[in-house]
Image (tube, coloured by chain):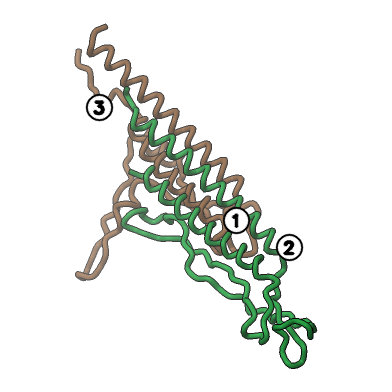
Chain colours: A brown, B green
Amino acid sequence: MMISIDKAFGIHEKALPLFAKRMEVLANNISNQDTPNYKAQDIDFEAVLKRANQGQQFKKVKVLSTAGTHIQPDKASSDYDIKYVTAATPSLDGNTVDPHQAKTAYAENSMRYQISLNFLNGKIRGLMSAIRGE
Amino acid sequence: MSLLNVLDISGSGMTASSVRLSAISSNLANAESGATTPEEAYKAKQPVFKTIYDKSRFGETGGGVEVSDIQESTKEPRSVYQPSNPLANEDGMVFYPSINPIEQMADMISASRTYSNQVETFKTTKQLISQTLNMGQ
């Protein structure tokens, strides 16, 4: 029987960087809660998960460049959708960050990160005991 | 690693909030600083926040906040008749900045709340990083 180590980690291995990126986006929202005209952002997690379940990758669109100065789309934007959050109570200075919403989203995301981390830890421990044969 | 970027993002927020806090404390401290001419009177200072965009590090999302400018209040200073004040001009008038302490205090609470949010974010992220480093041990 072959144990495929790279398959053992399942979705968590890929979920961890995504949660880390979402942490970045949410921390940025918290940092900018007093910046005029700042629009709160978030990663559409469900869309990414749906695509991952269907085995689809974000298709990188090849843009036809007809002149040497044309720029190809950035690869950084190809793994997830960054969307703008609709504010329940937009403030007068054009800022759409709801501090409470931003904080709960951050807490929730760090929980999710920890969950994935725990799962990975469990998998690693399992593999280790299988390898050691204890 | 994205999580290390989060430390920078909340760090930038702490810096911006502390600039805001020091501007407020300067405004409050100088609320009663008199001057002989309206031009010499202290002007209330207010920092202007701006989102940092660094495409090479953070992609299309913002990477924290920075103070792009510190603006001085354009409000006319208050003129008070105090002939006995050594700062009084020939008409006996002394000019004081028009600073509303209540406004400043409310601003201070908002700034300190933002600061503590940044500290919480920083703490959580630090914990997650050390847990990630200990993965599989």
Q: Position of residue A87 (x, y in %)?
A: 60, 53
The residue labelled by disc 2 is B102
Amino acid type of the residue that numbered disc 3 sits on in the rendered structure:
Asp
Label 2: chain?
A: B
Q: Residue at x 53, y 71 (%)?
A: B70
- A113 relative to A63, above or below: above
The residue labelled by disc 3 is A6
Distance of mark 3 from mark 1, alpha carbons? 47 Å
Distance of mark 3 from mark 2, alpha carbons? 60 Å
Give A120 or B9, whichever is nearer the viewer.
B9
Q: Secondary structure at mark 2?
A: helix
Q: Secondary structure at mark 3?
A: helix
The quarter of the picture where the N terminus of chain B appears is: top left
Q: Position of residue A39 (x, y in %)?
A: 53, 58
Q: Residue at x 34, y 27 (%)?
A: B135
Give B30 or A98, whichever is nearer the viewer.
B30
Q: Secondary structure at mark 1?
A: helix
The quarter of the picture where the C terminus of chain B appears is: top left
Q: Residue at x 48, y 48 (%)?
A: A27
